[in-house]
């Protein structure tokens, strides 16, 4: 199922062209997280963990190996960054770009949460702090003082970098016995056998990029149809 998403994403990227860049990477593995200044998406496909930083790979590999040997699993956070999307993609009411992006990302297996821009952190901000104020730049272009909205305001792309974060749950396929009930209502224990990934988020990074590409390609084509 995920392979078909990645295939569709490859087609969507061809439609978008080289002007739109979509990158993602693991920025948190269990309790271990990257600081904002550590994130480097160019490192994502240079290591087996799809981590957005090479410096943490040895420590994260050791941690994940311990989780695997314990027969358990762990969750993770994947960050998404989209550059090159122009102003105007999306809609202010039906077909909001952030709503469609969130829906597409939430449809990925094991994703239990999506935030765009500052996301849940914006709940701690005042209106003054959260506002992405604008000024005219020296080249006659609008310059934003911040990007708490994550590149989308009122359902429409602002031309800024589109940012999102996804929470992947730990897989339920673990070796530790878990309490459950049978079809006839009898209490029992369930233990998963076989080989299972201790963290499914690692395999989810290409899927995240693919789903984002599909949403953006759709938004681009609709914008082209509406504006010519």
Image: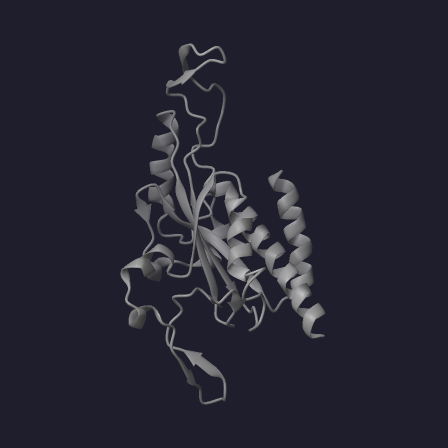
In depth, the one of 83 and 185 nearer the eye is 185
The colour mode here is one colour
Would residue 17 be visible to someone looking at this image?
A: no
Would residue 209 be visible to someone looking at this image?
A: yes
Q: How many callouts does the rendering have?
A: 0
In depth, the one of 198 and 221 nearer the eye is 221
Image location (x, y in percent) of residue 70: 35, 25
Left or right placement of residue 68 versus residue 227 in this view:
left
Judge whether 73 appears above or below 150 on screen: above
Q: Residue at x 38, y 66 (%)?
A: 148
Image location (x, y in percent) of residue 62: 34, 37
Task: Please tell me in which quadrant of the rendered image residue 224 appears.
Answer: bottom right
**Direction front: furthest residue:** 93
Q: Residue at x 50, y 53 (%)?
A: 102
Q: Residue at x 30, y 70 (%)?
A: 129
Q: Quadrant of the C terminus?
A: bottom right
Image location (x, y in percent) of residue 90: 58, 65
Image location (x, y in percent) of residue 50: 47, 47
Left or right placement of residue 201 versus residue 125 in this view:
right
Judge whether 160 appears above or below 8 on screen: below
Task: Please tell me in which quadrant of the rendered image residue 87 appears.
Answer: bottom right
Left or right placement of residue 129 versus residue 138 in this view:
left
Q: Residue at x 56, y 50 (%)?
A: 104
Q: Quadrant of the N terminus?
A: top right
Judge whether 18 appears above or below 10 on screen: below
């Amino acid at each position: 199922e995920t392979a078909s998403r990645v295939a569709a994403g490859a087609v969507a990227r061809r439609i978008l062209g080289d002007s739109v860049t979509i990158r993602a990477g693991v920025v948190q593995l269990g309790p271990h997280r990257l600081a904002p200044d550590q994130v480097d998406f160019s490192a994502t496909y240079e290591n087996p963990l799809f981590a957005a930083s090479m410096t943490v790979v040895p420590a994260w590999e050791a941690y994940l190996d311990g989780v695997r040997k314990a027969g358990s699993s762990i969750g993770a956070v994947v960050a998404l960054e989209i550059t090159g999307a122009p102003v105007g993609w999306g809609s202010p009411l039906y077909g909001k770009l952030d709503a469609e992006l969130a829906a597409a990302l939430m449809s990925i297996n094991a994703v239990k949460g999506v935030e765009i821009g500052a996301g849940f952190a914006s709940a701690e901000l005042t209106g003054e702090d959260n506002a992405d104020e604008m000024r005219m730049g020296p080249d006659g272009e609008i310059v934003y003082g911040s990007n708490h909205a994550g590149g989308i305001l009122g359902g429409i792309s602002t031309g800024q970098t589109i940012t999102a974060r996804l929470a992947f749950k730990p897989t339920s396929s673990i070796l530790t016995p878990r309490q459950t009930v049978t079809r006839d209502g009898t209490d029992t224990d369930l233990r998963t056998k076989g080989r299972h990934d201790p963290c499914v988020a690692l395999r989810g990074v290409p899927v995240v990029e693919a789903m984002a590409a599909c949403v953006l390609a759709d938004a681009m084509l609709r914008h082209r149809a509406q504006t010519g």
